[in-house]
Image: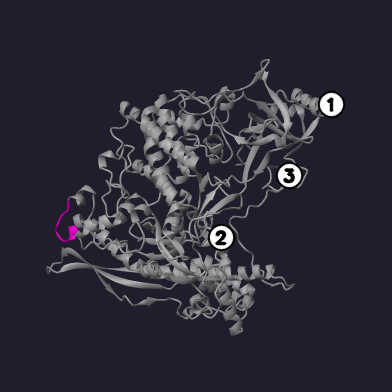
């Protein structure tokens, strides 16, 4: 393969080069920063000391993150540059309104539509912008600052096929790329990430003695601590997170492909990384995605392997010197540090991992387990980069070592990871929740096994009869008719699958299903402890101990399944790199929309990669300028003077959670972070409803006795005796806001508990709706950890109250499913009911009826609660409920 135009730098917006953030040099004569300014996690003052912070205790792993001197962030330098040039903050646009128009044009319209809009008489005569067509508009955008520039390398690939003259055929492909070191500089110095940036690793504990460790972000795991010992004292490591994934660009014709390469750094908190609008993960290149028709079919696959590694070597070449010698970078806290960018993790699906590891797809890309032993719970040796590189070198020189076939290698010699300092590509492969668990083990295997046991018709009947729950998808036609499966559908099935199988499949099969779901839910936790990691290992061991039942039922002949074997590496990866939600392949697939599909649709579909790079550079320039204006506003608001900046540019935060249009039930102003708060709508949905209507429409046969008992217990001196003639204000639902569960999210939890009667179809096409009387967990206030289950039929005000029909106390968990059993509670042949304060409702819960081996076809989602009396408490309805039962 030959490179052409290797020195050709592609900068579509040429004039913006002079305004790039890189052109504003830091002051080289600033005095060294004091050592106390080294840190973000540096509340850990002395090495080895455990220091409290934010409810956790931190122990610094080793000295790192030291600052050399003070510097200036990109926004600070750009502000000084504009002040020095005497430019307004809106320049090159005339005013705030014109900047808003420019931002909308770049984000919403393509070049043709922009021209059409700017030529409209109302635009020219009324708005009179300083640009009159798309060309002059792009010149304005050209003057905005942007990140690392794009360049193009042309590569000539010579195949093994010949033309009619006997000459070898060749194919020219293009590699579009940006300098990854420059992209890392842009990320680590971005002031928007200041509060989410970490420069040195530490161990995190829940106790001051340092006995109970927790692992969440990469800086709390082992890899960074171990790597810190391999770089000079005080150095800052930028753990590189790479992701590659080929994607289709055309909706109806599959001949247009893109091969994006994404990069982020582990210094940024994973919650911020997952916000696509924050742009904490950036695009650094498009790999060639040609068909290589110059090769015969039997050689084409290997040629694609060679081309991939060759292009990745060119793309990542700047990381070699930077990882060995370090690069001084201005960080988000305005301090200059020596930064060592080192490849830490590689996010990819299984075929892509095998491509990177240069192994066949019947082998594990991480370890050297024998193919026919992948179905066993073994601790196989990990692949060693130096050993693999040596084997491939021997194969290249014709020695044909036996390990080449034993390890399932492919003849790739230009390994892109061979020279990257301090990196181990085989350890870098992280768990892939989407492809390995949701789509793989669950949908492709567990669901298929159970369908083979019970049949499609019966499985569909179970899903049709599944009771309703807020936000739970109801498969009203079953699952056999679903044409296109996405990760969302898989997750919805998982929420009810164990309870659905209880009593319908042999008990040992149910144990297998429960073990897989346990593993899947444990793997999704955003914070791990010794207990959760033990839970992962225990679930996998239970599966392997019981999986033989599937062979006895002739469902499986063997378990040499690559995705099943990958589960044995999860605990190791979490210990090394942190919780799996920081490396899920769902993020790259979501980024395809912004960095590939939308960019392609903005092109004319010919030579589209160059146009995609142009379009992305415009988008990035507008995003940076908008971020800069937001930063200016924040600076003016936090300034100690009375000066206020007439900025008017509103910040857009994905993580901000708006409260409902409601009033809290609690009479005292209590923050959600301190305790649970219940909200009711400001106005009732059904004002002044007669008690007789409540008894009929809400199925509340014991409403009056329950209300009388409540008044007797809580208002013993009242002379009120409720009757059928009384009226009450009725609400559709109560919204419950609870403190965050750190195992799941940093955001407050919010649930709905509904109590709505049946709504008949209205006139025209307005559909009706069935009853929605949700199940809920309630607290009696005497024993806080003792929860009772009831069905909420009415939410009304006297003060805010709820009418609930009870279920029996939870019995011991079923031995096979692990689910608690319960039944309808009755008293003298009537439902056992009560009226309680609304704030006694802790949260909604989900009950699954005992369906047995065959479902009564009369059961539906709307009537199943009334059609049977025995249920399971579904602890898989969401991750929070699972944590209540499994972790606590």
Category of crowding for the residue at label 1, using alpha-carbon neighbours closer than 10 angstroms: few (below 14), some (14–19), many (at least 20): few
Which mark is in front, 1 or 2? 2
Q: Relative to 855, is 322 on the left or the right?
A: left
Q: Position of residue 45 (x, y in %)?
A: 57, 59
Q: Which residue is mark 3?
A: 664
| Mark 1 vs mark 3: in front | 1
The region drawn magenta spans 394-401
Query: Measured from the top left, where is residue 299 in percent x and y?
Result: 20, 57
Q: Nearer the viewer, residue 442 or 41?
A: 41
Q: Residues within 10 Å of mark 3 (few under 14, many from 20)?
A: some
Crowd around label 2: few <14 · some 14–19 · many ≥20 (10 Å)? many
The residue that mark 1 highlights is 716
Q: Earlier in the sequence, mark 1 or mark 2?
A: 2
Residue 727 colored in magenta in the image: no
Counting from the top left corner in percent of width and height, residue 92 is at: 57, 79
Q: Quadrant of the C terminus?
A: top right
Disc 1 element: loop
Which numbered disc, 1 or 3, marks the residue that appears first in the sequence?
Answer: 3
User: Tags 3 and 2 in contact by the CB under 8 Å rule?
Assistant: no
Mark closest to the chain's N terminus, 3 or 2: 2
Alpha-carbon span between mark 3 and mark 2: 40 Å
Residue that mark 2 sits on: 42
Q: Is residue 201 left or right of residue 769?
A: left
Secondary structure predominantly adopted by residues drawn in magenta: loop
**What is the secondary structure assignment of the residue under circle 3?**
strand
Residue furthest left in the image: 166
């Amino acid at each position: 393969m030959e490179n052409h135009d290797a020195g050709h730098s592609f900068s579509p917006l040429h004039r913006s080069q002079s305004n790039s953030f890189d052109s504003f040099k830091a002051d080289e004569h600033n005095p060294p920063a004091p050592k106390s300014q080294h840190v973000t996690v540096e509340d850990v003052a002395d090495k080895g000391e455990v220091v409290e912070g934010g409810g956790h205790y931190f122990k610094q792993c080793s000295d790192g993150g030291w600052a050399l001197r003070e510097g200036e962030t990109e926004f600070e330098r750009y502000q000084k540059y504009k002040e020095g040039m005497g430019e307004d903050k809106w320049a090159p646009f005339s005013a705030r309104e014109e900047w808003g128009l420019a931002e909308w044009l770049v984000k919403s319209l393509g070049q043709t539509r922009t021209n059409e809009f700017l030529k409209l008489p109302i635009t020219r005569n009324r708005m009179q912008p300083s640009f009159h067509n798309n060309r002059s508009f792009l010149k304005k955008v050209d003057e905005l600052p942007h990140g690392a520039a794009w360049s193009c390398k042309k590569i000539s690939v010579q195949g093994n096929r010949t033309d009619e003259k006997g000459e070898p055929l060749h194919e020219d492909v293009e590699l579009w790329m940006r300098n990854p070191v420059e992209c890392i500089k842009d990320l680590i110095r971005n002031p928007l990430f200041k509060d989410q940036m970490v420069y040195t690793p530490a161990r995190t504990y829940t106790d001051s003695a340092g006995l109970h460790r927790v692992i969440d972000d990469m800086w709390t795991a082992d890899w960074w601590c171990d790597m810190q010992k391999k770089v000079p004292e005080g150095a800052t490591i930028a753990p590189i997170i790479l992701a590659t994934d080929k994607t289709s660009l055309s909706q109806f014709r599959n001949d247009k492909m893109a091969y994006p390469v994404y990069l982020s750094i582990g210094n940024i908190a994973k919650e911020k990384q997952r916000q696509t609008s924050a742009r904490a993960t950036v695009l650094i290149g498009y790999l060639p995605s040609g068909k290589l028709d110059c090769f015969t079919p039997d050689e084409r696959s290997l040629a694609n392997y060679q081309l991939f590694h060759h292009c990745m070597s060119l793309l990542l070449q700047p990381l070699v010197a930077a990882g060995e010698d370090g690069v001084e970078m201005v960080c988000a806290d305005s301090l200059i540090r020596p930064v060592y960018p080192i490849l830490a993790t590689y996010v990819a699906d299984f075929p892509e991992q095998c491509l990177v590891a240069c192994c066949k797809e019947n082998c594990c890309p991480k370890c050297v387990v024998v193919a026919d032993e992948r179905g066993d719970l073994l601790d196989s040796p990990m692949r060693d980069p130096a050993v693999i590189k040596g084997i491939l070198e021997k194969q290249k020189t014709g020695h044909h070592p036996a390990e080449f076939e034993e390890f399932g290698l492919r003849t790739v010699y230009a390994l892109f990871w061979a020279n990257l300092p301090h990196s181990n590509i085989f350890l870098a492969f992280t768990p892939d929740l989407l492809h390995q668990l949701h789509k793989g083990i669950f949908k492709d295997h567990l669901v298929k096994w159970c369908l083979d046991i019970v049949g499609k018709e019966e499985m569909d009947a179970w899903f049709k009869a599944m009771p309703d729950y807020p936000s739970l998808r109801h498969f009203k036609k079953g699952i056999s008719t679903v044409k296109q499966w996405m990760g969302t559908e898989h997750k919805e099935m998982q929420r009810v699958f164990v309870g659905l199988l209880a009593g319908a499949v042999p008990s040992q099969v149910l144990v297998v299903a429960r073990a897989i779901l346990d593993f899947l839910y444990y793997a999704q936790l955003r914070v791990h402890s010794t207990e959760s990691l033990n839970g992962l290992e225990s679930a996998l061991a239970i599966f392997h101990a019981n999986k033989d039942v599937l062979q006895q039922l002739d469902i499986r002949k063997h378990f040499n399944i690559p995705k099943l074997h990958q589960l044995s590496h999860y605990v190791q990866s979490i210990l090394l790199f942190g919780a799996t939600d920081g490396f899920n392949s769902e993020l790259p697939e979501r980024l395809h929309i912004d960095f590939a599909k939308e960019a392609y649709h903005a092109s004319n579909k010919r030579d589209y990669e160059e146009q995609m790079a142009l379009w992305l550079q415009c988008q990035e320039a507008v995003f940076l300028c908008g971020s800069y204006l937001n930063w200016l506003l924040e600076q003016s608001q936090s300034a100690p003077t009375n000066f206020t900046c007439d900025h008017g540019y509103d910040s857009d935060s994905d993580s901000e959670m708006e409260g409902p249009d409601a009033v809290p039930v609690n009479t005292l102003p209590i923050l959600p972070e301190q305790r649970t708060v219940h909200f009711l709508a400001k106005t009732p949905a059904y004002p002044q409803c007669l008690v007789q209507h409540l008894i009929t429409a809400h199925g509340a046969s014991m409403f009056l006795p329950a209300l009388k008992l409540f008044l007797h217990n809580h208002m013993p001196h009242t002379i009120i005796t409720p009757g059928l003639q009384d009226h009450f204000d009725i609400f559709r639902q109560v919204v419950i806001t609870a403190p965050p569960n750190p195992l799941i999210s940093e955001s407050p939890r919010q649930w709905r508990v509904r109590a709505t009667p049946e709504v008949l179809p209205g006139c025209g096409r307005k559909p009706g709706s069935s009853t929605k009387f949700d199940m809920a967990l309630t607290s009696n206030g005497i024993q806080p950890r003792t929860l009772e289950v009831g069905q909420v039929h009415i939410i009304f005000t006297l003060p805010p109250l709820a009418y609930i029909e009870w279920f029996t106390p939870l019995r011991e968990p079923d031995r096979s499913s692990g689910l608690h059993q319960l039944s309808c509670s009755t008293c003298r042949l009537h439902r056992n009911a009560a009226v309680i304060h609304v704030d006694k409702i802790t949260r909604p819960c989900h009950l699954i009826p005992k369906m047995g081996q065959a479902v009564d076809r009369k059961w539906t989602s709307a009537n199943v609660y009334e059609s049977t009396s025995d249920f399971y408490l579904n602890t898989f309805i969401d991750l929070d409920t699972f944590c209540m039962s499994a972790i606590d």
